[in-house]
Image: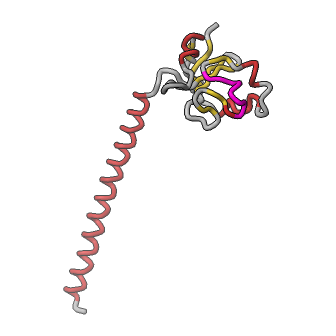
Amino acid sequence: MNNKLLLAILGTILVGGLIFGIYTVSNSSTSTDTTQQSTQSAADNAPATSSSPSATPASIATSELAKNTGKNGADCWVAVNGTVYDVTGNNEWVNGSHTPSNGQAQCGRDESSSIGSSPHGSSVLSSLPVVGSLAN
């Protein structure tokens, strides 16, 4: 192979690699910007209530808890020991009833007294989203 042809091939490879590198860095930057925008959008759309330690828990009135029965499209909230949890979409809660308890536990209520008699007790609570604190 002659030197001119070899230099042309190497030049093409180098230019192609340079273009690919610039394209990759450019898209990486765009991807990061998109991720940051998505993260910011998610934060902007987050409900005012939060389970983060630095946030002050929302005060949930008993009447507000009672509206979240898990029926007719309503969220499913339960209170236990002063904390209101969101069990919406949990497979154990169907149409406002806790199926393993044969419906004895219901959404929209304070279930502090009944959770102690359940096989799992309060151990499942740490995996549930916190809505806020039940107002007295």
**Residue 16 at x, y = what percent?**
26, 69
**Residue 10 at x, y = what percent?**
27, 78
- Residue 11 lies in the magenta stretch: no
**Residue at 61% across, 16% down:** 133
Task: Answer with left or right where residue 100 lies relative to residue 43.
Answer: right
**Residue at 24% across, 75% down:** 11
Q: Tell me where the magenta segment starts and ends, as one range.
A: 100-107
Residue 82 vertical placement versus 11 (above, below): above
Residue lying farthest to the top in this orientation: 136
**Quarter of the rendering occupied by the C terminus:** top right
**Residue at 76% across, 33% down:** 120
**Residue at 77% across, 29% down:** 118
Q: Quadrant of residue 65?
A: top right
Residue 14 vertical placement versus 120 (above, below): below
Task: Answer with left or right where residue 86 lies relative to residue 38.
Answer: right
Q: Quadrant of residue 91?
A: top right
- Residue 105 lies in the magenta stretch: yes
Residue 1 vertical placement versus 72 (above, below): below
Camera-side residue: 41 or 67? 67
Residue lying farthest to the left in this orientation: 4
Camera-side residue: 28 or 8? 28
Residue 30 vertical placement versus 12 (above, below): above
